[in-house]
Amino acid sequence: MGGLFGVASKADCVSDLFYGTDYHSHLGTRRGGLAVKNSDGYVRFIHNIENAQFRSKFETDIQRMSGPLGIGVISDYEDQPLLIRSKLGDFAIVTVGVIKNAVELANQLFLQESFHFAEMSDGEVNATELVAALISRQPTFEDGIRSAQEAIQGSCTMLLLTQRGIYAARDRLGRTPVILGKKDGAMAATLETCAFPNLEYSIEHHLGPGEVVFFDADGYEQRTPPGDRMQICGFLWVYYGYPASSYEGINVEAVRYRCGAILARRDDANVDLVAGIPDSGTGHGLGYAAESGIAFQRPFVKYTPTWPRSFMPQDQRIRDMVAKMKLIPVRELIEGKRLLFCEDSIVRGTQLQDTIQRLFEAGAREVHMRPACPPLVYGCKFLNFSRSKSELDLASRKGIRELEGDDPGDVSRFADPDSSAYRDMVQAIATRLKLTSLKFQRLDDLVEAIGLPKERLCTYCWDGVE
Ligand code: SF4
């Protein structure tokens, strides 16, 4: 996935840039980057954040940064921000999203012009560099952003730091949000609105899908109006968005609470306590507990002092180890108890399998699981939040494989919660995870909990509808 933050200020912007970018740390594990523009030019730092927090990596660098304009990024893949010298002038760029046709676009550039890219170590073109190249070929930044957005399959939200101000461009179908905030003497753009309150920005404008604005410390101008069609990622509210953030004016924690309440309304489980798998299952669990009248407790406590991040390293083995180390079971709340857990989602289920086993080892009598979204039947094509995961690794696909072998054909019947195929798949997942019971949220209920019309949401990973 990844996150971005940009700020234009009448004073020095570095402190706001540093903390504003840091508030996106839950969205990526690989690279962090900051760039500022001042009268001497651009200053930029990029660090590997796989084994250390963003703040600790940049604390020294920011002493050497100053200027009124800056952009920052948490990147789950490529090095960013990039500094570009072009016929449009010098600029810095950060992007969030995934470009599915990156190879084709790069090949077109090779054929049309004698073009070259600085390759990444694993041989792929840096996607942000590709976007910069597409933009720089056009007569203006606005034309460049528009042409890049038209050419890109996937999604690409970006910030461009230019000589005079910052362009903020939301991806064509608005799968990721961009929000402008304002305070006295400064304006900022963010993906996560949780970056605003403590930096004293108030929300000024939610960019629409494909909308492009240009802002400086005095205000913003719309350069490209929003498109009609929006497909904002529904998974933002369920799983990877931060609870204190709002997208389209809808708060994440409030949606999670409603998700849990709706799960409880459809449920008849007879249990001793309700819990959430920390962190993102907590809001869902609280909503479930309030609606059902069953006490919310914490049979697992997360060790936050040294394991604060929700996203984990790309290496599955290390990720599993970290997942285990950060969750500490509380035996007194587990032994002999019938436990119901709300979980944001079941992606592959490997960590959850281990968690469930630990609950039974600690003496749990029953473990019931209530994911707050439907089974993930399709891999995400539009954001890279699960870049390293093959669709076939999804827990649902493993269940389907058990039922129908390697070639199940069209799997859409498994996304219909009223079909027997769906029921069999859910049972296969429950059996594999050794759960006492498993009930997923229905998609229509999830859409109700979010509160946007279904056609304004991306729900592809659940129902395959594009
Ligand atoms: S496919 Fe799923 S994760 Fe990807 S953008 Fe759509 S809702 Fe979000």
Image (cartoon, grey):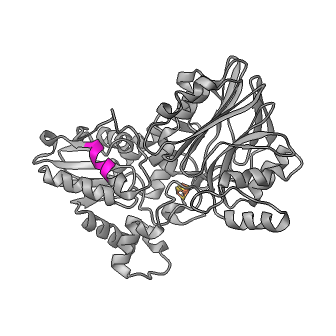
Viewer-side residue, 391 vs 419: 391
- Identify which residue is drawn at 43% across, 47% down: 311
Give the residue furthest to the right: 139
In the rendered view, tell whether residue 463 sits above or below residue 261: below
Please state if 237 lies on the left or on the right of 275 as rendered.
Answer: right
Regarding residue 418, the answer to whether it shows in the image is no
Decide whether the magenta segment is chiefly helix, strand or loop.
helix
Tally of numbered tags:
0
In the rendered view, tell whether residue 411 sits above or below residue 356: below
Ligand 1 resides in the quarter of the picture at bottom right
- Identify which residue is drawn at 44% across, 81% down: 408
Viewer-side residue, 115 vs 17: 115
Identify the image quadrant of residue 10.
Answer: top right
- Identify which residue is drawn at 58% across, 20% down: 200
In the rendered view, tell whether residue 65 sits above or below residue 442: above
Regarding residue 259, the answer to whether it shows in the image is yes
Please state if 397 lies on the left or on the right of 97 as rendered.
Answer: left
**Residue 221 inside the magenta-drawn segment:** no
| Quarter containing the C terminus | bottom right
Look at the image and give the residue range highlighted in magenta.
321-327
Residue 415 picture location, percent across and down: 45, 67
Residue 1 picture location, percent across and down: 54, 50
Residue 272 picture location, percent across and down: 17, 45
